Image (spheres, helix red, strand yellow):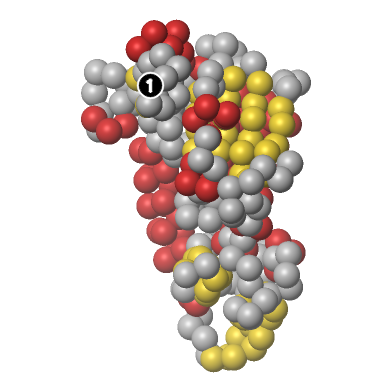
Amino acid sequence: MIRKIIHIDEEKCNGCGLCAEACHEGAIDIVDGKAKLMRESFCDGFGDCLPNCPTGAITFEEREAPAYDEAAVKESQRKKAIVEAVRNMPHHPGGGCPGSKYMSLATEETEEAAAPAAAKPVSRLRQWPCQIKLLPTKAPFYDGAKLLIAADCTAYAYANLHEDFMRGKITLIGCPKLDDVDYSEKLTEIIRDNNIQSVTIVRMEVPCCGGLQRAAETALRNSGKFLPWQVVTISRDGRILD
């Protein structure tokens, strides 16, 4: 059938992923750093994704396309909701996936005792897990914590991340481009429901990393708390820009 459907100009697309987040039907994916209309029957033609595109890469067109399949969209949304609910379930030390059980790791005092200044570098990770999608919203290690919300790539681009940023903080990492989830909801719960002292956001200079910063800023606003916070931007060659 001939109907109105979106068109994505890949030359203009910067891969930020905002359109995929805005498409509640799940028609758009980010593939090889570009937004693509992967499921034409999921596109309702209303264009919720258009206002979110910062480069103007998305427009409407009328062409031959499958009819909008509302039933398939609802079934897909139902499955995603189940998966997300399972991912967000608190992971208790007594059960669940072994890789997702939360635990506190060595304290900074223990680390200092075990690693004198002349020794090789030590990890400053103070809890497990550290991926935002896997972290519980409530855990003992949040009590009185300073949060570090960091993009995945910062650990590889900035050589001294452990000492300069992770030390003394609870570390939460994620990639808004690869994770098909809105971080702001979970981050809001973590900040609102725990005794958090401050928030540091470390992101890369690339545009898609702005999604992590926006999620953290949204969480700070929605938490109803007034906490000290800062954003640090890392260049692709490992320099601090901000």
Q: Residue at x 61, y 61 (%)?
A: 16
Q: Is residue 96 above or below residue 35?
A: above
- How packed mark 1 is, by other alpha carbons closer than 10 Å (few <14, some 14-19, many 20 or more), is few
Report x, y in % for residue 111.
40, 14
Residue 110: image quadrant is top left
**Quadrant of the rendering where the C terminus is positioned:** top right
Q: In the drawing, does residue 200 fall left or right of residue 181?
A: right
In this view of the protein, can residue 222 be seen by the observer? no
Residue 236: image quadrant is bottom right
Report x, y in % for residue 183.
56, 41
**Which residue was labeled with disc 1?**
119
Total number of numbered labels? 1
Q: Nearer the viewer, residue 166 or 84?
A: 166
Tag 1: amino acid: Ala
Q: In the drawing, does residue 182 fall left or right of residue 99?
A: right
Q: Residue at x 41, y 51 (%)?
A: 80
Q: Nearer the viewer, residue 54 or 48?
A: 54
Q: Is residue 20 above or below residue 158?
A: below
In this view of the protein, can residue 148 be seen by the observer? yes
Report x, y in % for residue 172.
50, 33
Q: Nearer the viewer, residue 240 or 64?
A: 240
Q: In the drawing, does residue 19 fall left or right of residue 225?
A: left
Q: Is residue 105 above or below residue 213?
A: above
Q: Is residue 155 above or below residue 146?
A: below
Q: Secondary structure at mark 1?
A: loop
Report x, y in % for residue 22.
62, 58
Q: In the drawing, does residue 2 fall left or right of residue 129?
A: right
Q: Residue at x 36, y 38 (%)?
A: 86
Q: Residue at x 41, y 14 (%)?
A: 116
Residue 104: image quadrant is top left
Q: Residue furthest front?
A: 118
